[in-house]
Amino acid sequence: MAKRSPFNERYQKQNAHAGSTRKSASSAKPKRSAGTYSAAPDKKSPVKKKQTWSEMVPSTPEIKKWRRIWYVLLLLAVASFGLAYWGQRIENDLMATVGFVIELVAVGVAIAIDLVVIRKLRTQAIKDNAAAKKGKPTKTAEKAMSKSDNDKTAGDAGKDPS
């Protein structure tokens, strides 16, 4: 690479004395020390905490009711498995068959509740939470409002308007 000539006008500063050159970009010092991250979080915005799994999964009283039923069915399935196992140990085919059938039915109903009922309620609760953050009324809120309006009009039907 060719050396810069201090006498070339291109490398001379405007008000500098003759014979001095501009400093190169490689001699510029960084404003931060090496290895540090320069982008600092905004002090105005609050620090977001990491959500736990229980905060991410919405829960309503109806979901809690169905989840309780789901737990009871799973406990019933475990107990009936014990019954079926005991029936095999004592060589009682009727007890083993009944325990096995109860176990299969309880597990099947529990899976159906989880996949159909609770999933539908959970997705509706997620939509309600998202709409509530945006400030929009949801279908369930609209239904509740229209139901309360209908109850008021039905209750006022027999009253004197004066």
Image: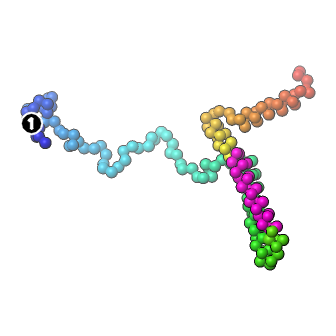
Compared with residue 66, is residue 7 higher up or lower down, i.e. above or below? above
* Res. 75 image quadrant: bottom right
Residue 149 vs residue 122: left or right? right
Residue placed furthest toward the top? 162
Q: Residues within 10 Å of mark 1 (few under 14, many from 20)?
A: few
The image quadrant that residue 80 belongs to is bottom right
Question: The N terminus lies in which quarter of the figure?
Answer: top left
Residue at (35, 49) in percent of width and height: 36
Mainly helix, strand or loop, the magenta region?
helix
Give the vertical position of 17 relative to 106 (above or below): above
Q: Which residues are magenta?
A: 98-121
Taking the spot 23% from the left edge, 42% from the top edge, the residue there is 28
Q: Is residue 30 left or right of residue 108?
A: left
Residue at image position (67%, 39%) is 128
Res 88 visible: yes
Disc 1 residue type?
Answer: Ser
Q: Is residue 73 above or below residue 62?
A: below
